[in-house]
Image: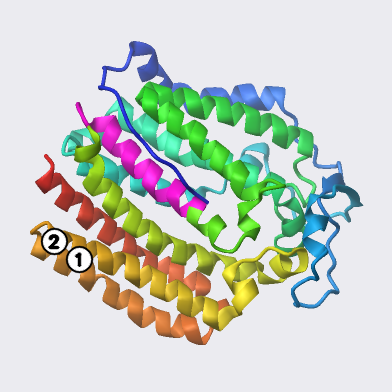
Amino acid sequence: MYTLQHQCPSRALLPPVSIICGMKFHSLYLRVIFQAVSFNHSNLSQVSEIPPDRHSDNRLPDAGAPEAIGRRKPVIRTLRSSEPLSRIGLLVRFLKPVTWIPVIWSFLCGAVASGAFGWNEFFGTKFLLALLLTGPLATGTCQMLNDYFDRDLDEINEPSRPIPGGAISLRDATVLIAIWSVLSVIVGYLIHPLIGLYVVIGIINAHLYSANPIKLKKRLWAGNIIVSVSYLIIPWIAGEIAYRREFSLDSLTPSLIVAGLFTLSSTGTMTINDFKSIEGDRQVGIHTLPAVFGERKAAIIAAVLINLGQLLAALYMLSIGLASYAVAVAALILPQLLLQFGLVRSPRSMDVRYNAVAQNFLVAGMLVCAFAIRIINP
């Protein structure tokens, strides 16, 4: 989920110690952490918010059901038959690398829009630290938090996840989340002090999304919106701030507008991600669009949001006098539109394929807009 805002001071050269961090940071902290934290593969007794009911139907629960989410009950789990992963493999699975890509891409778009990012920057310490931050650290922290607070849902939807599967205990998960949170803030500060603040805001958003009693995930639109903001607006503006020598609200406005419009599209793609967990969401009262409106209507709503955000971005490009960029963004909507017909016909079987193919055109439109902003705001 997402939601955030941003501002900024002037840029300074990173101290020599940050260069060392950029090269050796990842391998070093993994060794330290795994000496301090022991994953208990044999501990099958975990705490879950509610025990899964694998025989319940798909109807929405009655008015009293949502309160059950807040009650903690011990659940005795049966042993999973899957092969145990190595400690490194288990940690990687806990961090969900596939979720890092959108955040890294948004940061890259912001860096391009700043006008100060060139090919040489790909090998600079700052960009390497940004990859570490937007990938395994900050995004990984949010994914671990989501797994921790959604362990009751994962018992139903993804029982092989590390926590419900018994591979990671709640104690070990808590220690990892704490360490990763601190490391994320430190690395964010090394890139730019204001980015360290943004990391804190992102971690707070992750709690708001998943943790009771607020748990925005169960509040229809709110969950998808906060995730989209955290995955798109925050890293995009962070990319601008990281590379602009000077910036103001006026200089950041084009990026805020474009990132906000693509956040609308991202809210639609978040809805598509909810199809895979519709049964568990209905059982415990998580009011996602598919759980409330059904798969077909939810797919239509998602498609409208995805197309609307990009169309508005194209119109914004046109309004600032960049007609060729507007045409390019609009043209990238067409292949997505074609794939959406199949998505609406069969949401559950097409969701993964749609996101794997259609998202490429959406993120390409983001980069087109970033290059356009680079022109108008050098």
Residue occupied by mark 1? 315
Please tell me how crowded label 1 is: few (under 14), some (14-19), or many (20+) other residues with Cα within 10 Å.
Answer: some
Magenta range is: 226-247
Q: Is residue 96 above or below residue 247?
A: below
Q: Is residue 221 above or below residue 375?
A: below
Q: Secondary structure at mark 2?
A: helix
The answer to whether 324 appears left or right of 146 in the picture is left
Residue occupied by mark 2? 319
The answer to whether 167 appears left or right of 10 in the picture is right
Residue 161, position as x, y percentages in the image: 70, 53
What's the amino acid at mark 1? Leu
Instruction: Examine the rendering and report whether any part of residue 92 can be seen.
Output: no
The answer to whether 63 appears left or right of 376 in the picture is right
Residue 267, position as x, y percentages in the image: 45, 62
Q: Secondary structure at mark 1?
A: helix
Residue 130, position as x, y percentages in the image: 37, 34
Main secondary structure type of the part rendered in magenta: helix
* Residue drawn 70% across the image and 65% down it: 281
Residue 36, position as x, y percentages in the image: 70, 22
Disc marking residue 91: none
* Residue drawn 41% across the image and 85% down it: 341
